[in-house]
């Protein structure tokens, strides 16, 4: 007797329709970005709402690559990687402590971290500017790395804590019984199991820093230390906006984020701890 | 191998005291089983021995050497966790050889020892697998293998079999007994399972609410429990305890039966009488101590458990050997084996028997 439950074709179709709708919704802006980047300038306004342009050109990309864009790009890469690495390192250490140790003032520190997340950035932009100017770090990429790291640490810490919470303490204790010091247990057992968490945190901070505009605009005014989002604004001149080049630059800016996520996505795969403990 | 000594050990979390006055000497090569109700401190005691939990007060020593301040790695003790705690990112082989890897043993030596342990535990074909690709029983074996390879001074087990199904438990129980005989190592074993405790232990330690109630061989605890708690905790089904009053000719039970036994008066007044289900006989009408009505009957094949009610609606469990054709609702006569009765004082301690009054 066959007991196979057949899914109704209608439900299957509905499911795919929902997924399709979501994909179109999420990907349409990216399509539009690439489309305009490839449309010759002359056609941008005349064919503004057509789904497919009648002619294609790579002139915009060529122009962008000959401009200061590569400099912005490099600056952004330095800032984003620096902030991501710094934040993840500090957040991992803090998250581990929150997850594993009991100490005086733990609740107060957690509360403080939460409070810092409540203020709108606009409120602290002036004080930050004053501090950075006082340190003589205006127009330096270091200031951006430090500021981004500081802003992302609270959230990243909670993120890392939740990943550490997900690793059974038994594993560390077993490692210590097997002859490890606490630090060895951390390095040989906990660290490999936290790779998904580290990957997620790195990715989160990287993208946040990559697209940050407000502080980059305030703290950087010299052309050779501009990051990419600020540089993008230079395509807006007083009299016109060079849409084609702007979109071409935007398309290129997607590349590092994509590469970054392709690289870390294998660490994001869940279920790495399965099999450690029963069930 | 090693002798473990706990002297006046106590443990507090903040100002909550969870263990106190723990005095226990574990001989070299001895198999000690810790039993007790949930939350009584079995795991805590084990973890203090392992060094995973600091000892609040008192001293723990191995072979006379104080251990309190030593880290787990310096105590040379292996532990098998209830959750197995296998490293999920390492193969079975690397899991088992991890302690040797940390100790920087040469690779060939490590591989040889892992292969040998895997052979003993029937894991030789699983060495390249990851823990997630194993069944519960296989994971359990890997956890044991990991402990064996260390060649530690003592083994600790925290309910190692409680996640396994019944038949696998029996098999692993025998495995552990075999392992103990072969290695002749000191072992401390926590369990909830009566059968495990009674079959594996050289001595059983009964804990309640953070205190040791009694230490003794399985037979000692069964035959001469120090108090009502131990009497009821050891043995299955549980010992029956009935209120009793001293009267003419012995102890009077609530339903009028008088049992011709007496306790040592100097140890206190007996207020309760304890009798194990297997020490009550079903006898011919008029020949017993009391008449009861059968309420539930469980036929186990080798034995028959009969749950009966006395006239005063008190429940008693009777265990008869073999198959006894009793129907629920039937009346029957019970006889209490006199030499197997236990007497308890008001505070629960056992009163020594002095024979007939
Ligand atoms: N970190 C802690 N803080 C406060 N109390 C604790 C802590 N850990 C354990 N306890 C308490 O210590 C007592 C003993 O706990 P333990 O885990 O040793 O019990 P157990 O006998 O192993 O129980 P089980 O059979 O359920 O495993 C319990 O009452 C528990 O509530
Ligand atoms: Mg426990």
Image: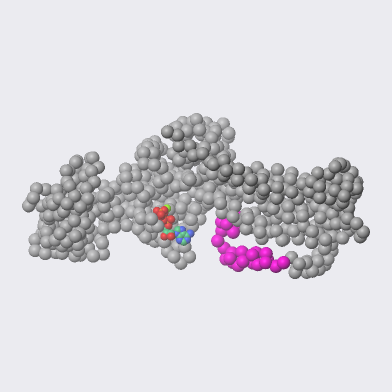
Q: Nearer the viewer, residue A17 or B227?
A: A17
Q: Is B348 in the magenta? A: no
The answer to whether A6 is drawn above or below residue A112 in the figure is above
> Percent x, y for residue A170?
51, 49
Q: Residue at x 27, y 55 (%)?
A: B232
Q: Quadrant of the C terminus of chain B?
A: bottom left
Q: Quadrant of the N terminus of chain B?
A: top left
Q: Nearer the viewer, residue B32 or B301?
A: B301
Residue lying at the far left in this picture: please name it: B286
> In the picture provided, is A232 more to the left or to the right than B346?
right
> Percent x, y for residue A263?
70, 43
Q: Is A114 in the magenta? A: yes
> Percent x, y for residue A224?
88, 54
Q: Residue at x 29, y 51 (%)?
A: B234
Q: Residue at x 73, y 52 (%)?
A: A206
- Quarter of the image holding residue B241? bottom left
- Span colored in magenta: A95-120
């Amino acid at each position: 007797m066959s007991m196979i439950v057949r899914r109704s074709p209608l439900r299957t179709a509905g499911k795919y329709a929902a997924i399709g709708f979501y994909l179109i919704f999420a990907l349409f802006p990216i399509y539009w970005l690439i489309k305009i980047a490839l449309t010759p300038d002359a056609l941008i306004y005349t064919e503004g709402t057509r789904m497919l342009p009648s002619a294609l050109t790579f002139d915009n990309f060529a122009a962008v690559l000959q401009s200061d864009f590569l400099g912005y790009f490099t600056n952004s890469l330095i800032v984003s990687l620096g902030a991501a690495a710094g934040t993840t390192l500090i957040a991992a250490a803090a998250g581990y402590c929150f997850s594993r140790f009991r100490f005086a003032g733990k609740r107060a520190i957690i509360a403080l971290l939460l409070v810092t997340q409540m203020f709108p950035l606009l409120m602290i932009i002036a004080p930050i500017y004053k501090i950075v100017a006082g340190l003589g770090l205006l127009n330096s990429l270091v200031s951006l790395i430090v500021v981004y790291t500081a802003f992302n640490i609270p959230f990243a810490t909670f993120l890392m804590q939740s990943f550490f919470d997900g690793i059974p303490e038994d594993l560390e204790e077993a490692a210590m019984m097997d002859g490890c010091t606490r630090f060895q247990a951390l390095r040989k057992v906990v660290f490999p199991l936290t790779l998904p968490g580290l990957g997620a945190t790195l990715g989160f901070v990287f993208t946040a820093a990559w697209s940050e505009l407000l502080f980059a605009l305030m703290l950087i005014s010299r052309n050779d230390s501009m990051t990419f989002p600020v540089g993008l604004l230079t395509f807006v001149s007083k009299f016109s906006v060079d849409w084609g080049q702007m979109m071409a630059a935007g398309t290129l800016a997607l590349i590092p984020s994509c590469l970054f996520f392709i690289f870390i996505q294998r660490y994001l795969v869940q279920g790495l701890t399965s099999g450690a403990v029963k069930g | 191998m090693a002798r473990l000594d706990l002297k006046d050990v106590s443990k507090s979390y903040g100002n909550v005291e969870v263990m106190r006055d723990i005095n226990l000497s574990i001989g070299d090569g001895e198999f000690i089983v810790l039993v007790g109700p949930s939350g009584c401190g079995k795991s805590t005691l084990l973890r203090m021995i392992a060094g995973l939990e600091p000892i609040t007060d008192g001293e723990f020593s191995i072979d006379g050497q104080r251990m309190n301040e030593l880290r787990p790695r310096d105590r040379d003790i292996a532990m098998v966790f209830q959750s197995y705690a296998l490293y999920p990112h390492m193969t079975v082989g690397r899991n088992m050889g991890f302690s040797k890897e940390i100790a920087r043993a040469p690779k060939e030596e490590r591989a040889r020892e892992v292969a040998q342990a895997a052979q003993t535990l029937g894991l030789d074909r699983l060495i390249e697998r990851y823990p997630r690709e194993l069944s519960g029983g296989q994971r359990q074996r890997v956890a044991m293998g990991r402990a064996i390879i260390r060649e530690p001074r003592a083994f600790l087990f925290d309910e190692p079999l409680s996640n396994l199904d019944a038949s696998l438990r029996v098999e692993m129980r025998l495995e552990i007994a075999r392992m103990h005989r072969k290695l002749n190592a000191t072992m401390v074993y926590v369990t909830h399972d009566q059968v495990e405790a009674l079959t594996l232990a050289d001595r059983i330690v009964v804990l309640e609410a953070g205190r040791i109630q009694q230490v003794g061989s399985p037979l000692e605890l069964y035959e001469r429990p120090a108090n009502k708690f131990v009497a009821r905790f050891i043995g299955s089904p549980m010992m029956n305890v009935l209120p009793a009053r001293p009267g003419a000719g012995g102890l009077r039970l609530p339903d009028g039966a008088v049992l011709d036994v007496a306790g040592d008066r100097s140890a206190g007044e007996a207020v309760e009488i304890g009798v194990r289900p297997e020490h009550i006989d079903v006898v011919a009408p008029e020949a017993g101590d009391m008449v009861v009505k059968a309420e539930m009957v469980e036929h186990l094949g080798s034995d028959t458990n009969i749950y009966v009610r006395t006239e005063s609606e008190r429940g008693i469990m009777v265990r008869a050997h073999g198959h006894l054709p009793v129907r629920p609702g039937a009346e029957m006569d019970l006889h209490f084996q006199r030499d197997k009765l236990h007497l308890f004082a008001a505070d629960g301690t056992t009163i020594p028997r002095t024979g007939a009054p």
